[in-house]
Amino acid sequence: MNEKNEKYLSSGEFAKLCKVNKQTLFYYDQIGLLTPVLRNEKGYRFYSIHQLELFNVIDLLKDLGMSLSDVQEYMNNKSPESFLTLMHRKKDEIVKIRKEIEMKERIIKTKINLMEEALLTDFNQVSVEQLPEATLYLSRNIENISNEEFFEVVSDFIEELYVSNLDSGFPIGVMTKKEHILKGEYTNYSYLYMEQPNPKEGYPYFQAVKGDFLIGYHVGDDKSIHKTYERLLVEMDRLNFSLGDYVYEEYIYDTIVKNHEEEFVTKIMIQIQK
């Protein structure tokens, strides 16, 4: 068997090189996917070192989501041209997957930053801050709509964010026009929004202008949020500010981190003018 030692690998040796067990090689042989180049009189299987590349390609295609039956179909009709077509298609799929992973990484980083910031925030504090210009992606107008219509808008908005890869990891907020705030209609929201720190071309965005904001926090459910608004508006008058064009709301703590609505925290950002 000197020839075997010089040119062929036993099934155990080949399996070790491929980092699989021998049963995997036996199964591939059984279905005609990877057949040993030699079988001796005792039925022992032997493989060529050149088959290692074939195994690696099979393993790669499996990792990229191809079923064994699809791999078999390719193997039964293989050619340089079909291999090149297959590799180009898989390359495009990997690029798409990488972009999705990078987007998810950005979302996770944003959520980490927001939660770390929230843990350092005093929710009893009311402050006046200058906020930078921000690019927002808006839903369709939601003023004076029913609960059923509101659910439909939220559902459509989430779908738009997903399909267009516009989920930035920032919370979905609501913005309310000045006219509704002045009427005491604090939950008659005008739009849903999500901040877009890296806006993509070709989408209609709303530009939230740089300016001064009175910022406070509501702890509890939406049913009592009017009390927080009334308190903030009293503080705004005391500081001799007038109401700007919009008020923005974002959840700081919601069902992701709290089980009870009375523990939810909403950040309220009231645009003001001196």
Image (cartoon, rainbow, N blue to C red):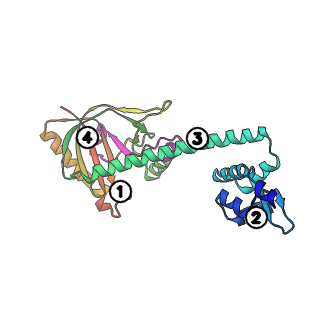
Local secondary structure at mark 3: helix
Instruction: Indicate which disc, 4 or 3, sits on the residue closer to the N terminus.
Output: 3
- Residue 126 left/right relative to 210: left
Q: Nearer the viewer, residue 267 or 146?
A: 267
Please give the label number shown on residue 270: 4
Residue 168, placed above or below residue 6: above
- SS of the residue at dot 1? loop
> From mark 3 to mark 2, how far is it between C-alphas?
34 Å
Left or right of 102? Residue 122 is: left
Could one spot residue 215 in this view of the protein?
Answer: yes
Q: Nearer the viewer, residue 259 or 244?
A: 259
Say which residue label 3 marks.
95
Q: Are marks 1 and 2 in contact (CB under 8 Å)?
A: no
Mark 1 closeness class: few <14, some 14–19, many ≥20 residues within 10 Å: some
Q: Amino acid at mark 3?
A: Val
Q: Nearer the viewer, mark 1 or mark 3?
A: 3
Separation of marks 2 and 4 at Cα, in angstroms? 69 Å
Q: Look at label 2 and name its amino acid.
A: Phe
* Mark closer to the chain start, 3 or 2: 2
Quadrant in the picture for residue 199: top left
Q: Secondary structure at mark 2?
A: helix
**Residue at left 33%, top 48%?**
114
